[in-house]
Amino acid sequence: MIRDTRIIRVACQRGFVTVILCLLSLYATQSFANGQGAADLEPQRTDGNSQQGIGLPWVLEQSLLHNIALKSFPYEDRAKEALALQAGIKPNPQLKVSVENILGTGDKQGVENAEISLALSQLIELGGKRQRRIDYAYADQKQAMSDYELLRLDVLAQSTERYYQLLRLQALQQWIARRMTVEANALEAIKVRANAGSVIQADVSKMALRLAQSTSAKQRIDGDVSVAQKRLAAMWSSEVNFNRANEKLKLVNVLPTAASVLNAIETAPQYLKLLSVERLMVAKRRMEESKGRADITVGVGVKSYDGFDDGALMVNFAMPLQFSNPNEGNILAAKANEDKANEQQRLARAQLKLTLLEVHQSMMNSAKQANYITSNVRPLAKQLLEHTQTAYQTGQANVLQLVDAQSELFTIERELIEAKAAVYYDLLALERITGQSMTLVNTTNKPVVAMEQPQ
C-alpha cells in the first residue's frame, strides 16, 4: 500500500517535472542568471534587418504546443476514457415472453388453451467483475498517460539536443571566421615580404592554399547550420523564421555528483513506466481471476393458463456448474505477465544505474578536458603562434612553421568546442534519463561539483 501511494505520488509529479525539465536546463539557467530569461520566451530582433534569434525556453514552448507527435494524444485519451466508461456498465435486465399450446390439434386448437409466460431476469456478476474491469481500464488509462509523458519528455529532449547542435555549429562558424581572419592577415603580410624579395612565392601559395581550405570549410559549416535550423524548426512543424540561437556555447560551471544522479533513478520516466506496467498487469490478473467466478441469473414472472383464466407466479434461478475454473489459462498467463513486469523492473533499475554512471563519467571527463584546454593548452598555443609570427617577420622561421603554429591553435580551439558540446550532450542525456534538471537537484545539499568557468 505504501509502495502504491509512493508510485501514484511520483507519477503525478512527473508531468510537471517533464514540462520544466528542459526549461531549467543549462542554457535556460545561464540566460536567466544573466537577466535574459524573459527575452528568450519569444524570437528577438537582433538587428535592423529584422533578423531573429531564439532562446531555448521559446523552443521548448513551441515544441510542446505544435509537435505533431503530441497532437494525437487527446484522441487516444478520450478513447481510453470511453473504454473506462464501458467497463463500468452493468448488464441490462432481460425480458422474456413465451406462448405455448397454441394452433395445435384437438383440445389445443386455437388459442383458448394457450399458456403465456412473462419473465424478467437479471444477470448478477459475482467476484467483483465490474470493479475489476474498471480497475483495469483505469490502469490502462494511466499506462497511456505514462507513455504520453515519456513521449513529451522525448520531444523536449530532442528539441534541446537540436538546439545544442545549432549552438555548436554557430561556435564553429565563429571559429572558422577567426581562422580565416588570421590566415588572411598572414597572407597579406607574406605578400608584402614576397614583393620585397624576402621570401619566395611558394610561401604566398602555401598560405593562399590554407585560406582557400578554410573558406571551403566555412561553406560546409554554413550549410550544416542551415540544415540544423531546419531540423530544429521541424520540432514544431514550422519553416525557419529565425537566423540564430541566442545563447553561446559555454562551459557548465556546476555539474551533478554521481550520488545525486543515482538518487534520481526513482523518478526516471523509464522506471516509472515499468511501475505503471506492473500496476496494469496486477489489474489484469485480478480481472481474470474474477472471471473465474460463476455468475448467477435470477428472474421473476407470471404464467397464465387456459386463455388467461388462471395464472401463477414464476421464479427463475440459473447458475453454471463449474467443476473446474473456466478461466484458469488466462489467469496463469496474466500471472506470468505480472512476474515478467516485476523482473523487467529489477533489470531496468540495474541498467539505469550503469547507464547513468557511464554518462556521468563521460560528462566529467569532457568537462575536465575543456577546463584543462582553456587553462593550459590554449594559452600555450596562442603564445606559440605569437612567437612564430614574430620569428617569421624577422626571417627566423619559415612559412611551414607559421602554418603549423596556426593549425595547432585552431585545432585546439576546435577540440575545446567539441569538449564543451560533449558536456552539454551528456548533461542532457542525464536529464532525459532521470526526468530531472541535473543542474538544480538538491542544491542545498552539495549535489554538484563546481568547475572552473573558462574565459
Image: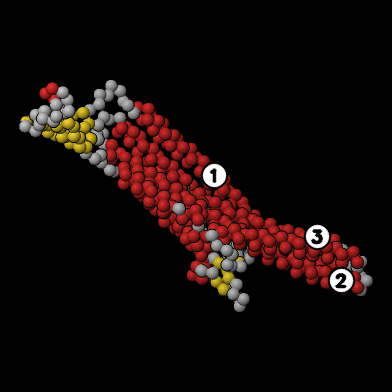
| Quarter of the rendering occupied by the C terminus | bottom right
10 Å crowding of disc 3: few (<14), some (14-19), many (20+): few
Residue 404's mark?
3
Residue 187's mark?
none
Does residue 384 appear in this view?
no
Q: Which residue is mark 2?
A: 191
Q: What separation in Å lies between label 3 and label 2 (alpha carbons)?
A: 18 Å
**Of the image marks 1 and 3, the number of the one nearer the N terminus:** 1
Residue drawn at x 14%, y 26% as measured from the top left: 109
How far across and how far down the image is residue 266, in percent?
A: 44, 46
415 sits left or right of 18 in the view = right
Q: Which residue is mark 1?
A: 355
| Quarter of the rendering occupied by the N terminus | top left
Q: In which image quadrant can residue 139 be found? A: top left
In the structure shown, which secondary structural element does the residue marked by tag 2 occupy?
Answer: helix
Tell me: residue 96, above or below residue 447: above
